[in-house]
Amino acid sequence: MVKANFSLHISGIDCNSVNLFGDRAALRKTLYNFADLYDKRPFDNTGGIKFASAFAYYFFLQQIAPKVVIESGIWRGFSTWLIDSMLPSSQLFCLDPVLMMPFKFESAYRPKRAIYSTQDFSCFGFSSETASQACVIFDDHQNVLPRLEQALHYGIEHVMLDDNQYAETYHESISHLLKNNHPILPYLFESIEEYYLFPPLIPPIPEECPVEPLWNEIPPRLQHLDIESEFAYTWVTYIRLKINSKFQFDAD
Ligand SMILES: C[S@@+](CC[C@H](N)C(=O)[O-])C[C@H]1O[C@@H](n2cnc3c(N)ncnc32)[C@H](O)[C@@H]1O
């Protein structure tokens, strides 16, 4: 039985529908608290998450409250700023090959307390103690199946994905697998306890998006934000893995 916020239609997998956003007053309060934090952002991000996706991170991370956050794909560090600000006591690992590239960002956020590495997540070697307290965030544009297998191998239960989109791109997402009714899905979802796609904040609904926007129009508190860029939808998804399961993405 997988808990999800929309129908997955995977053969042999029962789906328990969860309404994550039923408490509208609580959702509005979370949004407004986040808007206060976002107004203090160190720079306007480019090449990474903006308001809508940062809010999705905030919503999920607040619920998980992990003691360890592993970021795979940091770019200028905007998502690192968000995590550093909202989880000041967490241990932070930031992995990205960009750190060995010979150019400097005009603006970047690299807190001293974070552990930085250019090693790939697959070979970093997280201890089982670290993994058991961790949420890993994949915003590294790598194929999702090996990433989930690696997370399970470490014993990491909490996973967030950015760019889990239906439209074709250069990495494979779970939405792609769902769209193509890929035969691996029943095996994959046997290793998944919960699967939540964060909805768009406001219309329009992106093509093939299976969840409704959270608001019909921009809430008054957000009127100052640029509608074109800040509300862009990037298919942020939270997955809770069954850490004792043995998913292998290339199994026959
Ligand atoms: C979209 S950016 C990340 C944006 C960042 N999370 C933010 O919101 O500001 C994608 C990043 O993935 C990085 N990347 C590419 N391959 C990677 C890998 N194997 N492991 C970790 N990061 C990788 C790229 O260098 C790039 O910095």
Image: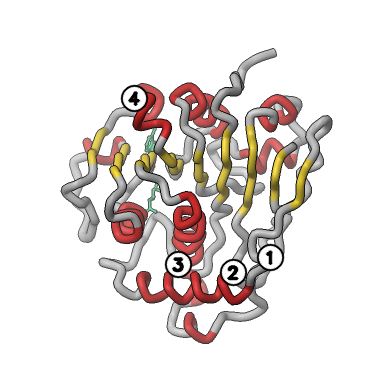
Query: Which residue corresponds to mark 3?
Result: 51
Q: How many residues crowd around disc 1 within 10 Å: few (fewer than 14), some, or many (20 or more)?
A: some
Query: Which residue corresponds to mark 2?
Result: 201
The residue tagged with tag 4: helix, strand or loop? Answer: loop
In three-dimensional space, the C-alpha distance between marks 4 and 2, rounded to whole angstroms, equals 37 Å
Q: Quadrant of residue 233?
A: bottom right
The answer to whether the residues at label 4 and label 1 have Cβ atoms under 8 Å apart is no
- Name the side, left or right, on which 56 lies relative to 102: right
Q: Position of residue 73 (x, y in %)?
A: 37, 42
Whichever of callouts 4 and 2 sits on the residue coming sooner in the sequence is 4
In three-dimensional space, the C-alpha distance between marks 3 and 4, rounded to whole angstroms, equals 33 Å
Instruction: Give the colour scheme of this rendering.
Output: secondary structure
Viewer-side label of 3, 1: 3
Query: Which residue corresponds to mark 4?
Result: 127
Whichever of callouts 2 and 3 sits on the residue coming sooner in the sequence is 3
Viewer-side label of 1, 2: 2
The answer to whether the residues at label 2 and label 3 have Cβ atoms under 8 Å apart is yes
Query: Which residue corresponds to mark 1?
Result: 205
Residue that lies at the very extreme toward the top in this rendered image: 252
Q: Position of residue 156 (x, y in %)?
A: 47, 32
Whichever of callouts 3 and 4 sits on the residue coming sooner in the sequence is 3
Q: Residue at x 70, y 48 (%)?
A: 4
**Residue type highlighted by circle 1:** Ile
**Residue type highlighted by circle 4:** Ser
Q: Residue at x 31, y 38 (%)?
A: 96
The answer to whether the residues at label 1 and label 2 have Cβ atoms under 8 Å apart is no
In three-dimensional space, the C-alpha distance between marks 4 and 1, rounded to whole angstroms, equals 41 Å
Q: Position of residue 125 (x, y in %)?
A: 33, 23
